[in-house]
Amino acid sequence: MNIWIAVLAGFISLLIIAVAMMGFFFLLTKAVEKSVLSEEKNNNAESGKETTIHF
């Protein structure tokens, strides 16, 4: 009976680790997506500035 309790505890701990990793990667991808979008926004703003310069 003790072996089944140990197996269940190990499985639950692995499940918790997997959920934590999924959450970490989700937040990481959201942060990268946000930085990429802000970088594109800055590039578009800069290119807009460059196109409005008249000599």
Image: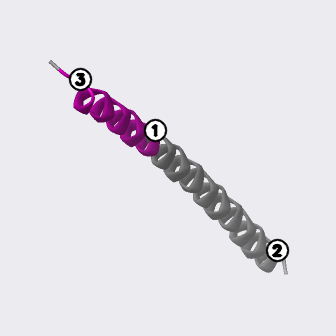
Residue type at the position of mark 1 = Ser
- Depth check, mark 2 against mark 3: the one in front is 3
Secondary structure beneath disc 3?
Answer: loop
- Depth check, mark 1 against mark 2: the one in front is 1
Q: Between 42 and 3, which is closer to the camera in this rendering?
A: 42
Residue type at the position of mark 3 = Ile
**Residue shown at the point (68%, 68%) measured from the top left:** 15
**Residue shown at the point (44%, 45%) measured from the top left:** 37
Q: Between 22 and 6, which is closer to the camera in this rendering?
A: 22
Compared to residue 45, the image places residue 33 above or below, namely below
Does the magenta-highlighted stretch encompass residue 48?
A: yes
Q: Earlier in the sequence, mark 3 or mark 1?
A: 1
Q: Earlier in the sequence, mark 1 or mark 2?
A: 2
Residue occupied by mark 3? 53
Residue occupied by mark 2? 5
Q: Are marks 1 and 2 in contact (CB under 8 Å)?
A: no
Secondary structure beneath disc 2?
Answer: helix
Residue type at the position of mark 2 = Ile
Q: Are marks 2 and 3 in contact (CB under 8 Å)?
A: no
Q: Which residues are magenta?
A: 36-54
